[in-house]
Image (cartoon, grey):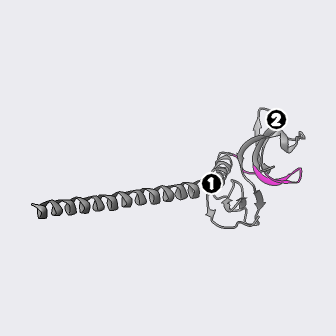
Amino acid sequence: MIHASRSHRIDTIFVLIIFCVFAVSVLMVLMLGASTYAKVTEMSGEGHSERSVLSYIWTKVKNSDDAGQVHVGDFHGLSALYIDEEIGQAVYRTAIYGYNGWVYELFCEAGLDFYPEDGQQIIRLDHLVFKWLESGLIRVSADARSLLIFPRGSASEADSYLAYAEGGASG
């Protein structure tokens, strides 16, 4: 009987040790999973602003109907993308530019003088540069991403297209 009681205690201790090992393993897997989830969430959010801005700009250019409406220029010392459109008898201009860590859009009658702070803040972004390339493409650089656009009426008469270049974009 003493032998059976001692065997029962050893079995109980063994089961408790197995349970503790299992519980510790489950906790470690949960902590590792939570850490991995946090890292993936952080990484997916890092490029969100750049992707959103580039898609926004591409859509604005794509929706301009007539040849010659889209051009790149200077807006009070800032690189800007201009989209002109005729409404009634007047020409209106949309200017998209980066200012004080934000992407701004300004819609006004062409020829009127406005200032960068007069525009509407769109999304937070540190770096936004537009460059007209000899091929008729417009390069849009937004932080670490870039976009190439063929506006209608450019040298190739090609439809606009989207091409992301990952990594350090040069302006």
Q: Is residue 7 left or right of residue 55?
A: left
Badge 1 or badge 2: first in the primary sequence = 1
Query: In percent of the image, x 21 and y 63: which residue is there?
Result: 10
- Based on the picture, tell me whether residue 33 belongs to the magenta stretch: no
- Mark 1, Cα crowd under 10 Å, few <14 / some 14-19 / many 20+, is some
Furthest toward the left, the residue is 1
Q: Where is residue 98 in the image (x, y as percent from the top left)?
A: 78, 51
Q: Residue 90 carries which label?
A: 2
Furthest toward the front, the residue is 2
Total labels drawn: 2
Query: In percent of the image, x 50 and y 58: which residue is there?
Result: 35
Q: Position of residue 55 (x, y in %)?
A: 63, 51
Residue bounds of the magenta highlight? 65-80
- Mark 2, Cα crowd under 10 Å, few <14 / some 14-19 / many 20+, is few
Identify residue type, mark 1: Arg
Report if residue 47 is visible in the image: no
Foreground disc of the pair 1, 2: 1
Residue 148 appears in which quarter of the rendering? bottom right
Secondary structure at badge 1 equals: helix
Say if 31 sits above or below 56 in the image. Answer: below
Q: Which mark is residue 51?
A: 1
Q: Position of residue 65 (x, y in %)?
A: 67, 45
Query: In percent of the image, x 46 and y 57: which residue is there?
Result: 31
Secondary structure at badge 2 equals: strand
Quarter that holds the N terminus: bottom left
Q: Where is residue 120 in the image (x, y as percent from the top left)?
A: 76, 39
For marks 1 and 2, give the CA distance.
Answer: 33 Å
Query: In percent of the image, x 71 and y 55: which residue is there?
Result: 153
